[in-house]
Image (cartoon, grey):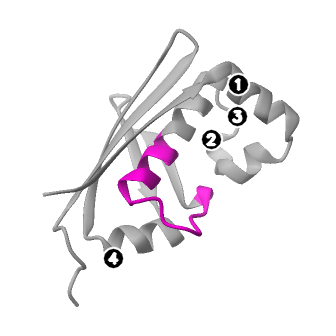
Amino acid sequence: MIVGTGVDIVDVERFKRQLERTPRLRERLFVAHERDLTLNSLAARFAVKEAAAKALLAPPGMIWQDCWITNDEHGAPRLHTTGTVAEVAERRGVQTWHVTISHDGGMAVAFVVAEGSGGPKSD
């Protein structure tokens, strides 16, 4: 069952200016292994984080570093959660995340589907 969906698009040049204007922004938005990626990859990962928040109905208090993206052996993106994001996902019954990312023409886009039971997990 689809629990939520989210989509986000990021203007890469605008994102670059934000990173330059606020030097600590990279540390606030990304976990250590993400911070040295190319600008296109950072913008795409930020779009994933935004899309995941939307799939969870944009809960207040979400900590950006509580979700991050890795790639599997085939290069497909995988969303990982902990802390604030994992807590909201569990309350909403999310069991699996589906993620797709693309960047072209100065834009990065991500689409996220949260799949699960559609309700809180029972103990």
Distance of mark 4 from mark 3, alpha carbons?
33 Å
Sequence order check: which comes first, mark 2 or mark 1? 1
> What amino acid is at disc 4?
Arg
CA–CA distance in space, label 2 to label 1: 19 Å
Q: Which mark is residue 14?
A: 1
Q: Earlier in the sequence, mark 4 or mark 3?
A: 3
Which amino acid type is marked by label 2?
Glu
Residue 29 vs residue 58: left or right? Answer: right
* Residue at far top of view: 105
Q: Which residue is mark 3?
A: 36
Instruction: List the residue tagged with mark 2.
Output: 34
Q: Is residue 93 magenta?
A: no
| Residue lying at 63% horizontally and 44% vertically, measured from the top left | 33
Q: Which mark is residue 100?
A: none
Disc 1 versus disc 4: nearer the observer: 1
Q: Is residue 105 left or right of residue 13?
A: left
On-image quarter of the N terminus? bottom left
Identify the element where label 1 is drawn: helix
Q: CA distance from mark 1 to mark 3?
A: 18 Å
Q: Which mark is residue 91?
A: 4
